[in-house]
Image (cartoon, grey):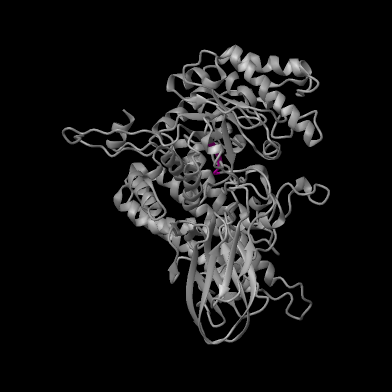
Amino acid sequence: LLELSRQAGVSPWVWWGDVVPQPQNRLAIPHGYATMQGASVEYRGIFLNDEDWSLRPWSYRNYDKSDFGNIGARTYKRIFELLLRLRANAIWPGMHTGTKAFFRTEGAKAIADSCGIVIGTSHCEPLLRNNVDEWNHKERGAFNYITNKDAVQKYWIERLKEVKDSEGGNMFTIGMRGIHDGSMEGVRTMDEKYNALQQVINDQQVLIGKYIGKPEQQMQVFVPYKEVLEIYERGLKVPEYATLMWCDDNYGYITRLSNADEQKRKGGGGVYYHLSYWGRPHDYLWLTTTQPGLIYNEMRQAYNHNVRKLWIVNVHDPKVAGYDLELFLDMAWNIDCVNGSTIGSHYNNWLCRQFGNEAGNAVFNGMKEFYRLCGQRRPEFMGWSQVELDKKLYQRGLSPVIDTEFSLTEFGNELDRYLYRYNTVCNAVAEAEKLIRPELKDAYFAAIKYPVFAAAAQARKTLEAQRARSFAKGSTNKDMFTGNPSLYAACAKSQQAYQEIRSLTNYYNKTMSAGKWDGIMHMRPRDLPVYAAPSLPTLLTDTEIDEWLAKGKKTNSVRPLSHNDIIAVNACRYTSASPGTETIDMLGHSMKAVSLQKEGSLTYEFSTETEGDATLYTALIPTQPNDGGDLRYAVSIDGGDETVISLKEPFRSERWKKNVLRGQSLRTTPIHISKGRHTLTIRALDQHIVVDQWMIDFKPGRKFYLIPTE
């Protein structure tokens, strides 16, 4: 039925995206039509996480009116329908502090069963218990398996009895951590952690066997996440029939995949992937802007490592997740639905299906550029601020917004060029909107116009404030009180951009779709500094803002790029490449990053009229060594000695933080270049090497953010 619905032109987002189908007088399929489809990944679904500022308030305040924190059964029914339309069959329900547990929500599990949606729980919620909401310290004592084993087991048994006859299916997470994403209680040394976790897993098999059925016939999941991975790699004995579920680093780069022995396990492998995240170095809980090419690159590798049992993706709100979520689930259903060179086509087809061929084709190039801009810096990261820092140094552990690394002078003013490119995307979106059927205006606003215009305003708010601060010299010259037109114009643009975000968000919640989505869009999740009003040398009145905006339209400080002392190249512009090289569309600052096989290489020919010492910048996608090894590549000029560079970074190291915020790992190598023709070779010494850009710069100590390859 759902396949016929798709063929009839009904988008999976017919309700969640308000994508009203095109009325048709006749529906037909060819005589003798047949289709046989089967999922590439057995269990495919979402984890509703960090729902505090979006899905949860919308549900209990608006759609499913109830007490604080309740995501009601009516809401879950809509979510399950979306999952079915997206050919998914699994969910980890919302579980944050303040959210009522799924199993305490009357009717929710029955609806899941009726839809055939398998219910599971996250890495820190064993045996379908939502500890944050369901473990009562006063009644049960400490959540400590060492000192309070009987109470913990009784707690698990209650849920096992409750779900024994579920028709929709159960997914039992095994192991144990703290109440909410913390380390296991009652153990200190690594030996204590290892022995305790092994005992927990062994005892859980007994409980499952007693209260559900043969353990080897149940869907069990073990998630070696954070410190649990270290315990697992000490030789922890996880049942052969349990699925090993690997994780990314919370920013889309998978940290570990099944090795040759693990790929043979009966329980197979799984991946827990993020399209949104709360945590260090910075949250991204506002918009969903992960580059499609990154999703493809990481999930294709997972599949190639026989990780085909379970794919779960973290979303704070399925509506906002949009295309990224559908791409993830499309690949889980049919891994060959897309390859490295067809990602753009897949997205273009999505746009045409959602908004009609004319509008979809018109807006496609603009939206590709939008993904490039967000890949260069997510809107949530524009403040160059961080979270979860030392609370003794920073209030709430949040560092303040500071000047970005975008230069007002280098490469013809890269700050203005970044804003100019956002402006061109906004213009493309506005023009394509004219081609939209009237009944699709709300769908277009939610999926396209809001994220583009809001992200553009976020960039303008931040960068114009930086410009204004650069003009405020604090001088004591005789003209210190004289009006500074450039400063006022920048302040006006920054203030207007902040007001625009507020206006767009208000329209999204209050006006769009007649208020259907009131409460689901929050422009400042967790009230982080990056979302606040801009920090400016002076504030203007509304009248002054209008005056200076009118004056500011007369100026344009974007200057032509100057390449006199640099050579800048996108990795896809290679002269030759080794077999197995794959160019991946919609990935990296270049939007065409190049994936190398181990021992594979790229060679580039270039010429220069400059001679002397220089810096070679190599920019790679900040992948993780998912085979547990290293992540090395080598660079050489004219076939000379190689310089070996390792991208491997300890989790949450300062360089790792910089990499994931930038969407690139930028490394420098000192070189000496003579005039004439040369070759540059980049060779992968390990797996998972993806090259984005490179640059040779003859200006020492240059301060810039983007390699100027436009």
**Residue at image x 78%, y 34%?**
191
Q: Position of residue 669 (x, y in %)?
A: 64, 72
- Compared to 510, does 646 lie above or below? below
> Considering the image in quadrants, where does the N terminus appear?
top left
- Compared to 369, does 38 lie above or below? above
Q: Nearer the viewer, residue 426 or 505?
A: 426
Give the extent of the magenta segment. Answer: 270-275
Q: Position of residue 157 (x, y in %)?
A: 65, 14
Q: Is residue 183 visible?
A: yes
**Residue at image x 60%, y 46%?**
255
- Compared to 635, does 651 lie above or below? above
- In the image, taking residue 50 as reference, residue 607 lies left or right, namely left
**Can you name the residue that lies furthest to the right here?**
392
Q: Nearer the viewer, residue 558 or 321?
A: 321
Tally of numbered discs: 0
Q: Nearer the viewer, residue 298 or 263?
A: 263
**Residue at image x 39%, y 54%?**
344
**Quarter location, residue 164:** top right
The rendered magenta stretch, by its main secondary structure, is classed as strand
Q: Is residue 488 visible?
A: no
Q: Nearer the viewer, residue 344 or 68?
A: 344
Residue 311 falls within the magenta-colored stretch: no
Residue 271 falls within the magenta-colored stretch: yes
Q: Position of residue 240 (x, y in %)?
A: 57, 28
**Quarter location, residue 364:** bottom left
- In the image, taking residue 393 as reference, residue 72 lies left or right, namely left
Q: Position of residue 254 (x, y in %)?
A: 57, 46
- Compared to 526, does 112 lie above or below? above
**Can you name the residue that lies furthest to the left here?**
31
